Image: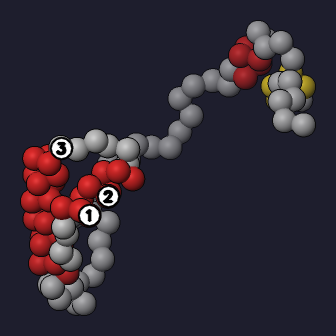
Amino acid sequence: MTLSINDVKQVAGLAYIKVSEEEAEAALSQLSGIFKLIETMQAVDTSHVEPMSHAQDLVQRLREDKVTESDQRDLCQSIAPQVENGLYLVPKVIE
């Protein structure tokens, strides 16, 4: 994809960013480099590559799933202004 200086200025205008001529030229150079890199990456045949969730084959260390704290719901709700059946009651804000 080929960009022009007008494209850079238009995008900057859409984002409400004021750019000088020098800044627009620098952005054009950087964006052109990014688009060239994307084109290079898209040219690589990845049809035989299996999708993966991480670049390295790592295993998440998991702790044992057990209760470590006591139930403190009643204690926490004792300071609430309004509670009913274990739920906090709040004022209606949307009518």
How busy is the neighbourhood of tag 1: few (under 14 within 10 Å), some, or many (20 plus)? few
Q: Earlier in the sequence, mark 2 or mark 3?
A: 2
Q: Quadrant of residue 6?
A: bottom left
* Mark 2 vs mark 3, CA separation in Å: 13 Å
Measure the C-alpha gap from mark 1 to mark 3.
Answer: 14 Å
Q: Amino acid at mark 1?
A: Asp
The residue under the point 90% across, 37% down is 95
- Count how many numbered circles sit on residues in the image: 3
Q: Amino acid at mark 2?
A: Gln
| Residue ID for mark 1 | 7
- Screen quadrant of the N terminus: bottom left
Residue 94 appears in view: yes
| Marks 1 and 2 in Cβ contact (< 8 Å) | yes
Dot 2: element? helix
Residue depicted at x 53% and y 29%:
68
Horizontal arrangement in the rendering, residue 19 relative to residue 21 (left or right): right
Q: Please identify the quarter of the rendering in which residue 67 is found.
A: top right
User: Quick one: 11 or 82, which is closer to the camera?
Assistant: 11
Cβ atoms at labels 1 and 3 below 8 Å apart: no
